[in-house]
Image: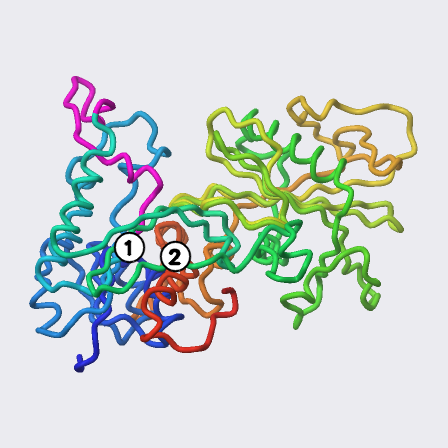
Amino acid sequence: MNSRELIIDNFAGGGGASTGIEMAIGRSVDVAINHDPNAIAMHKVNHPETKHYCEDVFDVDPIEATQGQSVALCWFSPDCKHFSKAKGATPVSKKIRGLAWVAVRWAKAVKPRVIILENVEEFKTWGPLLETEKGTYPDPEHKGETFEQFKQELEQCGYKVEHRELRACDFGAPTTRKRLFLIARCDQKPIVWPEPTHAPKDSLEVLAKVKPAYASAADCIDWSLPGQSIFERKRPLAENTMKRIARGFKKFVQDEAHPFIVRIGQTGFGGDKLSYSLNQPLTTITTKAEHLLVTPTITVNNIGHPGSNVKNPLPTITTGSHHALVETVLQKEEGTLAASYLVKHYGGNYSGAGIDLRNPTDTITQVDHHALVQAFLIKYYGSDTGQRLNDPLHTIPTKDRFGLVQIKNENYRIVDITMRMLQPHELSKAQGLPEDYIIDKDPEGKKVSKAVQTARIGNMVVPQCAEALVRANLPELCNNKISKTA
């Protein structure tokens, strides 16, 4: 280490916050701390210049780690599972809920100029616990008391403290992930909250070209990967999953007024060349069928998460992949129709239609629950009416799957619907990580399992949020080069 002010990333995970900080300051963070060897391995392969501690955060001595150098920024992303509403009614751990206290330890020991803490919205409810026969639970009579005490401890150390919730899609990431950020600083400078750089596609800012539209889920999908038919599976899909697929099909295939073209079959196309509006001329027609009429959607199989259009960012990406892409292909000259949307397999009683791929994704989690659904239809000239779309899809062993659906006054019969889980490299893009971020190999070049990749991605801070906060509060450390997604 040299004499420059240090940047410390506590609970560094796979490197989401560190990546965002690096986007802002143009160099790696100086110290990264995490207890999980898999997380440190992913961090190390992407941030080799950083000093890594694979230890419990409370086992690292701030004075030893900094070696007497001043600290510009300490970032903290303590485990959120024992605050998150996603945990439901299961017991909580006092030790894990208390991890944030390490920020006060660093404040007292080395007095960082700026402290930034990231967690779920429910972190504000941090309070005392009750011991019951069924386990340990938050005391509803004292919600938020420990959170206020935590802020007071920082204030007693000489810090001004503020907190606010930010959404990642507002800063260019293709996910609607919303998190609570707490900023504390002791250098007498004001706390600055960054202004959103992006807006919904139909907002006045976007229509007036003042801001770019939210990044879309569609841009994160690898359209070259095939799906598996939802029929004749060794293990049939659950009835709720079939219902969700049906709801998404009706909303995003049958009723969608503005599908878009996705180009397949050729290499060398990316970005805005991969997909385009039907209002534009069709690209070069080749000898192979390479143009798909696609109505992308993400169906959210999660309580409290409504569906959204693929023109919008994905909803929050959590530590398990819960998004499935449903794709229905329509080639009118050949009598075949196709479109796509995502479904999420969280379980519960969710009854929405899903997320349009033109919107951002929802939260990516540690477990792979996101699936891509593709529906294939053929032109139909018969007279039967088919099955109600609000009923579970029937498993019929012939290609004549469901009977009649009508799209823009033309009849089609569904011949197949395929579904596949989103892969780690797709989830990585949805979480806002750079294209070249390494998720599948450790520092020794050993292959990393998909489960570990997904867990690390889901645990990450969205880099665009970290970049925006650092640029706003530590501009003197930042370069002038804004990241592509910001």
Residue type at mark 2 is Trp
Q: Above or below — where is 396 with respect to 120? A: above
Quadrant containing the N terminus is: bottom left
Q: Residue at x 34, y 60 (%)?
A: 17
- Label 2 to label 1: alpha-carbon separation: 9 Å
Horizontally, residue 429 falls left or right of residue 163, namely: right
Mark 2 residue element: loop
Q: Position of residue 373 (x, y in %)?
A: 62, 42
For the point 55% across and 43% down, the residue is 324
Mark 1 falls on what kind of element? strand
Residue at 79% x, 25% y: name it. 386
x, y percentage for residue 231? 64, 34
Q: Where does residue 85 sit, x and y in percent of width and height?
A: 36, 33
User: Which residue corresponds to mark 1?
Assistant: 183
Q: Categorize mark 1 by other alpha carbons within 10 Å: few (<14), some (14-19), many (20+).
A: many
* Image disc number at residue 41: none
Q: Nearer the viewer, residue 273 or 160?
A: 160
- Whether the residues at callouts 2 and 1 have beta carbons within 8 Å, the answer is yes
Q: Is residue 104 above or below residue 389?
A: below
Please, is residue 93 above or below residue 183 in the view?
Answer: above
Is residue 396 found inside the magenta-colored segment of the image? no
Residue 119 falls inside the magenta stretch: yes
First to last magenta residue range: 118-141
Q: Which comes before the other along the chain, label 2 or label 1?
A: 1
- Reading the image, the residue beneath label 2 is 193
Q: Is residue 337 left or right of residue 464?
A: right
Where residue 353 appears, as percent x and y from the top left, is 62, 33
- Residue that lies at the very extreme toward the bottom in this rendered image: 2
Residue shown at 66% from the left, 30% from the top: 246
Q: Is residue 254 left or right of residue 47?
A: right
Image label count? 2
